[in-house]
Image (cartoon, rainbow, N blue to C red):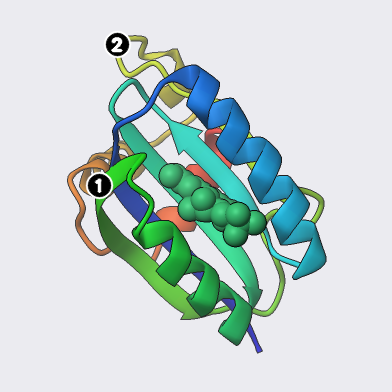
Amino acid sequence: MLYQIIYVSKRNCSEEEITKILDKSRENNQKINVTGLLLYTKDTFIQCIEGEKDEVNTLYDKIRKDERHSNPILISYKPIKNRDFPSWNMGEKKINLEETDFMADMSGEEKIIFSNILSGKEETNAIDVIRKLV
Ligand SMILES: Cc1cc2nc3c(=O)[nH]c(=O)nc-3n(C[C@H](O)[C@H](O)[C@H](O)COP(=O)(O)O)c2cc1C
């Protein structure tokens, strides 16, 4: 059964370090058929990982302990029929929260969901908003 995890965490690392994380993630995730997306702001990560339940659980357990971020909070954890990011072993997108452009396509309700994600509130519809950001 395919599962999808979305979590938010506090970013404690440089952009150079993020490049390393992405390179390693793409290499590793390809081997275990995990796909997803890493969104980041100057101080936050939002990551979606999807794949077989065991793979996703084991990976999240590993990622959680990484000291390049802290305080990971699960936003959504659910079985899925289809992947949202089937062609990305780990996509990436940098978001500048000071620019409102990235919210141009969002409804008022979606903006609230996005701010809930950033503040670590559980949101089963988080993926719909995240998809709009890439
Ligand atoms: C925000 C964040 C996201 C990460 N995402 C992934 C990922 O999707 N896949 C992965 O293998 N490692 C990811 N990592 C890195 C892992 O924590 C860990 O360093 C890496 O998997 C170790 O790989 P290795 O066991 O091959 O040395 C992430 C780390 C951080 C801080």
Q: Position of residue 57 (x, y in %)?
A: 49, 78
Position above or below: 60 against 45: below
Q: Secondary structure at mark 2?
A: loop
Q: Secondary structure at mark 1?
A: strand
Q: Amino acid at mark 1?
A: Ser
Q: As rendered, which of 121 and 90 lies closer to the eye? A: 90
Residue at image location 55% in from the left, 38% down from the top: 132
In the figure, is residue 32 to the left or right of 71? Answer: right
**Distance from the alpha carbon under mark 1 to that under mark 2:** 22 Å
- Quadrant of the drawing holding the C terminus: top right
- Quadrant of the drawing holding the N terminus: bottom right
Q: Residues within 10 Å of mark 1 (few under 14, many from 20)?
A: some
Residue at image location 52% in from the left, 30% down from the top: 18
Q: Amino acid at mark 2?
A: Glu
Q: Which mark is residue 3?
A: none
Q: Residues within 10 Å of mark 2 (few under 14, many from 20)?
A: few
Q: Look at mark 2 in the image and give the residue it sits on.
A: 98
Q: Is mark 1 within 8 Å of ligand 1?
A: no
Residue 75 placement: quadrant = bottom left
Position above or below: 73 against 42: below
Q: Position of residue 85 (x, y in %)?
A: 70, 53
Residue 55 placement: quadrant = bottom right
Q: Position of residue 32 (x, y in %)?
A: 75, 70
Q: Position of residue 96 (x, y in %)?
A: 39, 16
Q: As rendered, which of 21 and 74 lies closer to the eye? A: 21
Q: Look at mark 1 in the image and give the residue it sits on.
A: 70
